[in-house]
Amino acid sequence: MGVSRQLVRAGVPIPQVKYIFISHHHSDHNLEYGNLFYNAWAAGLSTPIHSFGPKGIEAMTKEYWELNKFDVETRIEDEGRPDPRKLLIAKDISDDGVVLKTSDVTVTAFRTPHPPITDNFAYKFETPDGTIVFSSDTAYNPKLAEFAKGVDVLVHECLYVPAVDRLVATTKNGATLKKHLLDSHTSTEDVGRIAAAAGVKTLVLSHFVPGDDRQVTDDDWTRDVKKNYSGRIVVAKDLMELKLPV
Protein backbone atom coordinates (compact mmCIF):
# COMPACT_ATOMS: atom_id res chain seq x y z
CA MET A 1 0.00 0.00 0.00
CA GLY A 2 1.05 3.59 -0.59
CA VAL A 3 3.24 3.11 -3.67
CA SER A 4 2.36 6.57 -5.05
CA ARG A 5 3.25 8.24 -1.77
CA GLN A 6 6.52 6.32 -1.49
CA LEU A 7 7.56 7.26 -5.03
CA VAL A 8 6.96 10.91 -4.20
CA ARG A 9 8.95 10.56 -0.97
CA ALA A 10 11.75 8.97 -2.99
CA GLY A 11 11.87 12.05 -5.21
CA VAL A 12 10.24 10.44 -8.25
CA PRO A 13 7.63 12.73 -9.87
CA ILE A 14 4.88 10.24 -10.64
CA PRO A 15 3.78 11.96 -13.90
CA GLN A 16 7.25 11.00 -15.20
CA VAL A 17 6.73 7.26 -14.67
CA LYS A 18 7.01 5.46 -18.02
CA TYR A 19 6.79 1.75 -17.16
CA ILE A 20 5.12 -0.46 -14.56
CA PHE A 21 6.09 -4.12 -14.07
CA ILE A 22 3.84 -6.51 -12.15
CA SER A 23 5.40 -9.83 -11.14
CA HIS A 24 2.22 -11.75 -10.26
CA HIS A 25 -1.40 -11.25 -9.32
CA HIS A 26 -1.28 -11.44 -5.55
CA SER A 27 -2.97 -8.38 -4.09
CA ASP A 28 0.17 -7.09 -2.37
CA HIS A 29 1.71 -6.75 -5.83
CA ASN A 30 -1.13 -5.39 -7.96
CA LEU A 31 -3.68 -3.78 -5.64
CA GLU A 32 -2.47 -0.23 -6.31
CA TYR A 33 -1.64 -0.73 -9.98
CA GLY A 34 -4.58 1.30 -11.24
CA ASN A 35 -4.32 3.84 -8.45
CA LEU A 36 -0.65 4.54 -9.21
CA PHE A 37 -1.55 5.39 -12.78
CA TYR A 38 -4.59 7.39 -11.68
CA ASN A 39 -2.54 9.43 -9.23
CA ALA A 40 0.01 10.17 -11.95
CA TRP A 41 -2.83 11.33 -14.20
CA ALA A 42 -4.27 13.50 -11.44
CA ALA A 43 -0.80 15.01 -10.97
CA GLY A 44 -0.57 16.04 -14.63
CA LEU A 45 0.43 12.94 -16.61
CA SER A 46 0.18 13.55 -20.35
CA THR A 47 2.49 10.83 -21.76
CA PRO A 48 1.82 7.08 -21.94
CA ILE A 49 2.71 4.54 -19.25
CA HIS A 50 3.33 1.00 -20.49
CA SER A 51 2.52 -1.77 -18.03
CA PHE A 52 3.66 -5.38 -18.15
CA GLY A 53 2.52 -8.37 -16.13
CA PRO A 54 1.27 -11.95 -16.29
CA LYS A 55 -1.92 -12.77 -18.16
CA GLY A 56 -4.68 -10.69 -16.64
CA ILE A 57 -3.01 -7.28 -16.64
CA GLU A 58 -4.82 -6.28 -19.83
CA ALA A 59 -8.18 -7.39 -18.43
CA MET A 60 -7.46 -5.71 -15.09
CA THR A 61 -6.73 -2.44 -16.90
CA LYS A 62 -9.97 -2.60 -18.86
CA GLU A 63 -11.98 -3.38 -15.74
CA TYR A 64 -10.31 -0.55 -13.82
CA TRP A 65 -11.59 1.92 -16.38
CA GLU A 66 -15.07 0.42 -16.19
CA LEU A 67 -14.98 0.82 -12.40
CA ASN A 68 -13.95 4.47 -12.67
CA LYS A 69 -15.83 5.41 -15.84
CA PHE A 70 -18.07 8.03 -14.19
CA ASP A 71 -15.20 9.81 -12.43
CA VAL A 72 -12.90 9.75 -15.48
CA GLU A 73 -15.45 11.06 -17.93
CA THR A 74 -16.60 13.72 -15.48
CA ARG A 75 -13.06 14.98 -14.97
CA ILE A 76 -12.21 14.94 -18.68
CA GLU A 77 -15.16 17.24 -19.39
CA ASP A 78 -15.13 19.27 -16.18
CA GLU A 79 -11.37 19.71 -15.74
CA GLY A 80 -10.08 19.49 -19.31
CA ARG A 81 -7.81 16.53 -18.66
CA PRO A 82 -6.60 14.12 -21.37
CA ASP A 83 -8.39 10.78 -21.57
CA PRO A 84 -6.31 8.49 -19.28
CA ARG A 85 -7.65 5.35 -20.91
CA LYS A 86 -5.46 6.11 -23.93
CA LEU A 87 -2.37 6.63 -21.78
CA LEU A 88 -2.20 3.29 -19.91
CA ILE A 89 -1.02 0.62 -22.34
CA ALA A 90 -1.05 -2.85 -20.77
CA LYS A 91 0.58 -6.00 -22.13
CA ASP A 92 0.14 -9.57 -20.89
CA ILE A 93 3.35 -11.59 -20.56
CA SER A 94 2.85 -15.21 -21.53
CA ASP A 95 6.40 -16.59 -21.51
CA ASP A 96 10.08 -15.94 -20.81
CA GLY A 97 11.97 -13.42 -22.91
CA VAL A 98 12.60 -9.75 -23.58
CA VAL A 99 9.50 -7.65 -22.85
CA LEU A 100 10.98 -4.18 -23.27
CA LYS A 101 14.02 -2.79 -25.10
CA THR A 102 14.93 0.90 -25.20
CA SER A 103 18.17 2.87 -25.49
CA ASP A 104 18.29 2.95 -21.67
CA VAL A 105 17.27 -0.54 -20.60
CA THR A 106 16.48 -4.07 -21.72
CA VAL A 107 13.96 -5.90 -19.54
CA THR A 108 13.69 -9.69 -19.65
CA ALA A 109 11.01 -11.76 -17.93
CA PHE A 110 11.67 -15.18 -16.40
CA ARG A 111 8.98 -17.49 -15.06
CA THR A 112 9.64 -18.73 -11.52
CA PRO A 113 7.38 -20.82 -9.24
CA HIS A 114 5.33 -19.22 -6.48
CA PRO A 115 2.82 -21.99 -5.64
CA PRO A 116 -0.02 -22.14 -6.31
CA ILE A 117 0.68 -19.36 -8.84
CA THR A 118 2.47 -20.36 -12.05
CA ASP A 119 2.11 -17.07 -13.97
CA ASN A 120 4.82 -15.38 -11.91
CA PHE A 121 7.82 -13.57 -13.35
CA ALA A 122 11.23 -12.41 -12.20
CA TYR A 123 12.72 -9.52 -14.18
CA LYS A 124 16.21 -8.66 -15.37
CA PHE A 125 17.03 -4.98 -15.99
CA GLU A 126 20.14 -4.47 -18.15
CA THR A 127 21.38 -0.87 -18.20
CA PRO A 128 24.59 0.89 -19.27
CA ASP A 129 25.48 1.22 -15.56
CA GLY A 130 24.86 -2.38 -14.54
CA THR A 131 22.38 -5.24 -14.43
CA ILE A 132 19.76 -5.96 -11.76
CA VAL A 133 17.61 -9.05 -11.30
CA PHE A 134 14.42 -8.81 -9.25
CA SER A 135 13.39 -12.28 -8.08
CA SER A 136 9.67 -11.71 -7.60
CA ASP A 137 8.09 -13.87 -4.90
CA THR A 138 9.48 -17.32 -5.52
CA ALA A 139 10.00 -20.75 -4.10
CA TYR A 140 13.62 -21.93 -4.00
CA ASN A 141 14.53 -22.11 -7.67
CA PRO A 142 18.11 -23.02 -8.75
CA LYS A 143 17.23 -21.94 -12.30
CA LEU A 144 16.88 -18.40 -11.00
CA ALA A 145 20.63 -18.48 -10.29
CA GLU A 146 21.22 -19.20 -13.98
CA PHE A 147 18.98 -16.27 -14.93
CA ALA A 148 20.92 -13.99 -12.54
CA LYS A 149 24.39 -15.29 -13.46
CA GLY A 150 27.03 -12.61 -12.88
CA VAL A 151 24.64 -9.69 -12.40
CA ASP A 152 25.63 -6.66 -10.37
CA VAL A 153 22.61 -6.76 -8.06
CA LEU A 154 20.17 -9.52 -7.17
CA VAL A 155 17.11 -8.33 -5.28
CA HIS A 156 15.67 -11.48 -3.74
CA GLU A 157 12.75 -12.17 -1.43
CA CYS A 158 13.48 -14.09 1.77
CA LEU A 159 11.77 -16.08 4.50
CA TYR A 160 13.04 -16.43 8.08
CA VAL A 161 11.80 -19.76 9.44
CA PRO A 162 11.82 -18.96 13.21
CA ALA A 163 9.66 -15.88 12.62
CA VAL A 164 7.24 -17.91 10.51
CA ASP A 165 6.92 -20.35 13.41
CA ARG A 166 6.08 -17.49 15.76
CA LEU A 167 3.53 -16.12 13.29
CA VAL A 168 1.64 -19.35 12.71
CA ALA A 169 1.52 -20.11 16.44
CA THR A 170 -0.86 -17.17 16.88
CA THR A 171 -2.87 -17.64 13.67
CA LYS A 172 -6.15 -19.57 13.40
CA ASN A 173 -5.22 -21.00 10.00
CA GLY A 174 -1.64 -21.53 11.16
CA ALA A 175 -0.96 -24.97 9.67
CA THR A 176 -2.33 -24.03 6.25
CA LEU A 177 -0.57 -20.68 6.27
CA LYS A 178 2.77 -22.23 7.22
CA LYS A 179 2.56 -24.76 4.40
CA HIS A 180 1.82 -21.98 1.92
CA LEU A 181 4.68 -19.78 3.14
CA LEU A 182 7.26 -22.58 3.14
CA ASP A 183 6.13 -23.89 -0.24
CA SER A 184 6.02 -20.53 -2.02
CA HIS A 185 8.95 -18.54 -0.60
CA THR A 186 12.72 -18.97 -0.26
CA SER A 187 14.40 -19.39 3.12
CA THR A 188 17.31 -17.13 3.94
CA GLU A 189 19.70 -20.09 3.73
CA ASP A 190 18.45 -20.96 0.24
CA VAL A 191 18.67 -17.32 -0.85
CA GLY A 192 22.38 -17.56 -0.03
CA ARG A 193 22.63 -20.65 -2.24
CA ILE A 194 21.04 -18.78 -5.16
CA ALA A 195 23.30 -15.73 -4.76
CA ALA A 196 26.42 -17.91 -4.49
CA ALA A 197 25.52 -20.03 -7.52
CA ALA A 198 24.79 -16.88 -9.53
CA GLY A 199 28.01 -15.20 -8.42
CA VAL A 200 26.26 -11.86 -7.94
CA LYS A 201 28.23 -8.85 -6.71
CA THR A 202 25.54 -7.58 -4.32
CA LEU A 203 22.56 -9.37 -2.81
CA VAL A 204 19.67 -7.21 -1.63
CA LEU A 205 17.21 -8.96 0.67
CA SER A 206 13.64 -7.77 0.20
CA HIS A 207 9.99 -8.82 0.55
CA PHE A 208 10.58 -10.21 4.04
CA VAL A 209 8.41 -13.11 5.21
CA PRO A 210 7.09 -12.28 7.69
CA GLY A 211 7.69 -8.56 7.35
CA ASP A 212 6.24 -7.32 10.62
CA ASP A 213 8.03 -9.32 13.32
CA ARG A 214 9.84 -6.72 15.40
CA GLN A 215 11.98 -9.40 17.01
CA VAL A 216 13.80 -10.09 13.75
CA THR A 217 17.02 -8.11 13.32
CA ASP A 218 19.16 -7.47 10.24
CA ASP A 219 21.58 -10.06 11.62
CA ASP A 220 18.75 -12.61 11.67
CA TRP A 221 17.99 -11.94 8.01
CA THR A 222 21.62 -12.32 6.97
CA ARG A 223 22.94 -15.05 9.31
CA ASP A 224 21.84 -18.07 7.29
CA VAL A 225 22.48 -16.32 3.96
CA LYS A 226 26.16 -16.11 4.94
CA LYS A 227 26.37 -19.89 5.28
CA ASN A 228 26.50 -20.07 1.48
CA TYR A 229 27.19 -16.56 0.17
CA SER A 230 30.23 -14.43 1.05
CA GLY A 231 29.51 -11.36 -1.05
CA ARG A 232 27.97 -8.03 -0.13
CA ILE A 233 24.54 -8.30 1.52
CA VAL A 234 22.10 -5.41 1.93
CA VAL A 235 18.95 -5.68 4.05
CA ALA A 236 16.52 -3.46 2.15
CA LYS A 237 14.62 -0.62 3.82
CA ASP A 238 11.88 1.60 2.43
CA LEU A 239 13.33 4.54 0.46
CA MET A 240 16.85 3.08 0.49
CA GLU A 241 18.84 4.06 -2.59
CA LEU A 242 21.63 1.93 -4.11
CA LYS A 243 23.55 3.38 -7.03
CA LEU A 244 25.03 1.51 -9.97
CA PRO A 245 27.75 0.52 -10.45
CA VAL A 246 27.83 -1.09 -6.99
Image (spheres, rainbow, N blue to C red):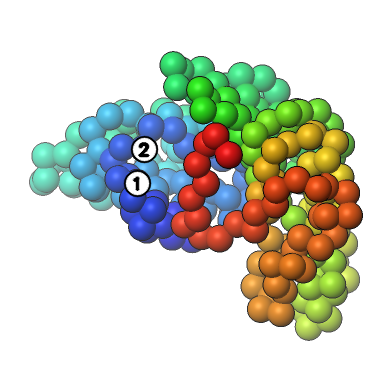
Count of numbered badges drawn on the protein: 2
* Mark 1 and mark 2: Cα distance apart in space: 8 Å
* Apparent side of residue 180 relative to residue 98 in the rendered image (left or right): right
Q: Residue at x 75, y 63 (%)?
A: 221
- Can residue 141 be seen here? yes
Determine the secondary structure under disc 2.
loop
Residue type at tag 2: Val
Q: Upstream in the sequence, badge 1 or badge 2?
A: 1
Q: Is residue 38 left or right of residue 112?
A: left
Classify mark 1: helix, strand or loop: loop
Q: Position of residue 160 (x, y in %)?
A: 80, 65
Q: Amino acid at mark 1?
A: Val
Tell us which disc is closer to us: 1 or 2.
Answer: 1
Residue 225, numbered circle: none
Residue 231 lies, in percent from the top left, at 75, 45
Instruction: Please give left or right for residue 115 compared with residue 237 in the image.
Output: right
Q: Residue at x 84, y 32 (%)?
A: 143
Residue at 81% over, 63% down = 223
The residue to which callout 2 is attached is: 17
- Residue 212 position by quadrant: bottom right
Q: Is residue 91 visible?
A: no
For disc 2, the neighbor class at 10 Å (few under 14, some 14 to 19, many from 20) is: some
Residue 240: image x %, image y %? 50, 55
Q: Nearer the viewer, residue 201 or 15?
A: 201
Position of the C terminus, as image quadrant, is top right
Residue that extends furthest to the bottom in the rendered view of this protein: 170
Which label sits on residue 12?
Answer: 1
Residue 32 in percent (x, y) is at 46, 52
What is the crowding at mark 1: few (fewer than 14 residues within 10 Å), some, or many (at least 20)? few
Tag 1 near tag 2, CB within 8 Å? yes
